[in-house]
Image (cartoon, rainbow, N blue to C red):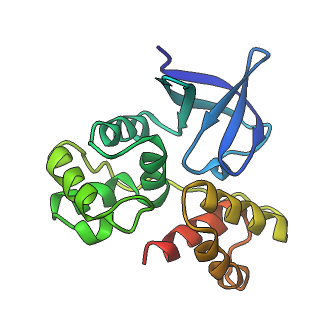
């Protein structure tokens, strides 16, 4: 129904963004909301998912990310939340390599993905996900502040990681060289997937 939206980011929260398109605010669930900045003019690719008791829109930085999301949804046992968690943690290249090499261990690092689901991902998507190369990730300078760290930790919990596991990372992230929410979140995702 929708392919993409162009507008200005009105709000960024730990689990979603709001994009203002001609005076209408659309709430989009995204893998990493902190890759967007409030006030930024963007084009966001979208996927509307309608269920019995829910209508949700999911947002993606590019068409390739949206395609990968839909491919993940085609796998039995993968829902939108799990697909977003996988997208937040792995580049398309890393995911494609894990599937091509039957790397069940890599796939079970994502929240909500057990051994059987990881094997199903490999079975269903082998040869279907291309590796276009790593996504460009720009870190925008912001003032170093614990608010960025708090937002990153909240986003990790929103992706499905247990609060206790995320809390254990707080000190390590705070002592890192990361200065932005996006950098804290990427580092946190990297540490959680080890």
User: Within the image, what quadrant is residue 17 found in?
Assistant: top right
The quadrant in which residue 170 appears is: bottom right
Q: How many marks?
A: 0
- Whether 83 is drawn above or below 179: the answer is above
State which quadrant residue 59 falls in. Answer: top right
Residue at image position (42%, 33%) is 63
* Residue 114 image position (x, y, % from top left): 32, 63
In the depicted view, which residue is nearer to us: 132 or 27?
A: 27
> Between 98 and 6, which is closer to the camera in this rendering?
98
Name the outermost residue toward the front: 53
The relative height of residue 169 versus residue 16 in the rendered view (above or below) is: below
54 sits left or right of 70 in the view: right
Please report the residue visible at 54 percent of the width from the left and 34 percent of the height from the top. Answer: 58
x and y, in percent, of residue 3 in the image = 48, 20
| Between 16 and 20, the one nearer to me in the picture | 16
- Whole-percent x and y of residue 128? 19, 42
What residue sits 57% from the left and 65% below the top?
186
Give how far across and how far down residue 54 sits, in percent. Answer: 56, 26
Q: Quadrant of the C terminus?
A: bottom left
Q: Residue at x 41, y 63 (%)?
A: 110
Q: Is residue 139 left or right of residue 11?
A: left
């Amino acid at each position: 129904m929708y392919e993409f939206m162009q507008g200005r980011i009105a709000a960024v929260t730990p689990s979603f963004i709001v994009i203002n398109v001609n005076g209408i605010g659309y709430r989009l669930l995204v893998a990493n909301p902190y890759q967007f900045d409030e006030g930024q003019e963007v084009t966001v690719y979208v996927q509307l998912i309608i269920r019995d008791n829910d209508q949700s829109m999911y947002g993606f930085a590019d068409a390739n990310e949206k395609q990968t999301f839909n491919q993940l949804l085609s796998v039995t046992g993968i829902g939108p939340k799990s697909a977003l968690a996988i997208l937040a943690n792995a580049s398309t290249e890393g995911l494609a390599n894990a599937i091509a090499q039957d790397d069940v261990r890599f796939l079970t690092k994502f929240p909500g993905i057990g051994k059987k689901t990881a094997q199903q991902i490999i079975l269903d998507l082998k040869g279907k996900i291309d590796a276009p190369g790593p996504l460009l990730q720009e870190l925008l300078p912001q003032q170093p502040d614990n608010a960025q760290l708090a937002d990153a930790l909240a986003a990790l919990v929103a992706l499905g990681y247990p609060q206790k596991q995320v809390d254990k990372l707080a000190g390590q992230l705070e002592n890192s060289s990361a200065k932005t929410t996006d950098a804290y979140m990427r580092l946190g995702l990297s540490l959680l997937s080890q």
